Image (cartoon, rainbow, N blue to C red):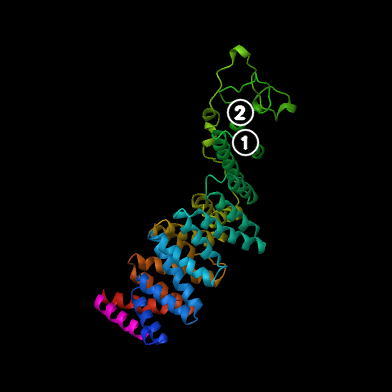
Amino acid sequence: MTIDRDTRLRQAETLLRQGKLDQAIAAYRHIVDRQPRDWNTANVLGDLYLTAGETDKAVLLFVRVAGSLAQEGFWSKAGAIYKKILKVRPRDEHVLLQAAEMAAKLELLADARAYLETVRDLRRDGGDDPGVSAITIRLAALDPADFDARFAGAGAHLAIGDVASAVKALKQLAAELAELGWSDRAMSALEEAARLAPNDLDLQKSLARFGTGADENVVVEEDPVEPIAQQDAPASDATELKVPVVLEHEKPAPKDLDDVFADLREEATQRFAANDPDQELAAGMAFYQAGQLDFAVPRLEAASRAPAHRFPAAATLGRICLERGDAWRAIDWFERAADAPPPTQADMHRLLYELADALEAEGEVARALAICLELQADAGDYHDVPARIERLTKVQARG
């Protein structure tokens, strides 16, 4: 196989030097069809497609190459290919998002921010408010030192209805700002979190300890405050935080800010819309688009239990598993999605292609071939399906 590849590669290079572009493209394509993981040759083929004016073919190939390089950890190479695509498709959201991810992994934060801001502008121009929120959340996660972006991210969580994540973000901001000595901003974050979660007694206690303008002789007891509903207090006091008054000589030593905000570091457990599949799906997709996979997964899993949402939720979970390198779990989710009604036939075609690709990568030749044949019967010459069928058929024949 190596000898055959080297021979064909020399032939392709000769054709290219002779100016026989179409024949050179065919020769390089022959190599790539039979060795789809030969990224260097695929990259050359993509460049030749651009030279020939076949932009769509070039972009499709470059996206596949860059995606595979990214999965294998070659972030710089993948980023370079995404930049190449953006020269001919500067408004391609998928490519912009992937380029941002590669830049972030390489700690090129200015580049990553620029890519994400471009996507946010595109979505804002298109009136996609949830999409704008998703990118704002992703920008907030980009640089922990960018507190303005993180405040905006908390607001974006609230805009998509995810109150718990907004509260969590504000708690983290309050803790970090307090440690830096920025008391006013810390207090603003804490007060906003308390406004969103008025029944969070830990927040109320932290506000009282940190300084809310209350009498300086008033401190919060360390034991949890008994719920108001269980106290013999008038109904009119139901919204007030009950704290005991301690005389000056009984006051404990002032607490360090680490102690004051220790409770703010705990993970928020409240889930917004826990029983509403529509909202679970919307939140899950928004988190996925924002690159917040840990937040996306539980919401998409919940949404997948509803038959009406099983296809988009399961398909997205499969893609998340692939991004995390868990191919077999991705295949499981893709197969669950394939058993559900798709929003459109185009969505089903994409899913089947991804399923076949995952199966082939794991050596499941017969299953991958069956999926490709099904896809060809329904969608014709979809992407490189004919070449895949030819390749898989030969592999299966060899046993």
- Classify mark 1: residues with Cα within 10 Å, few (<14), some (14-19) or many (20+): many
Which element carries disc 2, helix, strand or loop? helix
Q: Position of residue 147 (x, y in %)?
A: 58, 44
Q: Name the residue carrying label 2.
A: 210
The reply to whether callout 2 and callout 1 are in contact (CB within 8 Å) is yes
Q: Quadrant of the N terminus?
A: bottom left
Q: Position of residue 14 (x, y in %)?
A: 33, 84
185 lies above or below 385: above
Residue shown at the point (49%, 80%) measured from the top left: 54
Q: Position of residue 80 (x, y in %)?
A: 44, 65
Residue kind at label 1, given as amino acid type: Leu
Q: Nearer the viewer, residue 44 or 255?
A: 44
* Residue 379 visible in the picture: yes
Distance (Cα) linking label 2 and label 1: 10 Å
Q: Quadrant of the C terminus?
A: bottom left
For the magenta stretch, what is the residue range? 1-15
Q: Is residue 190 left or right of residue 75?
A: right
Q: Name the residue carrying label 1.
A: 190
301 lies above or below 187: below
**Quadrant housing residue 290:** bottom right
Q: Nearer the viewer, residue 74 or 30?
A: 74
Residue kind at label 2, given as amino acid type: Phe
Tell me which label, 2 or 1, sits earlier in the chain: 1
Q: Position of residue 252 (x, y in %)?
A: 56, 17
Which element carries disc 1, helix, strand or loop? helix
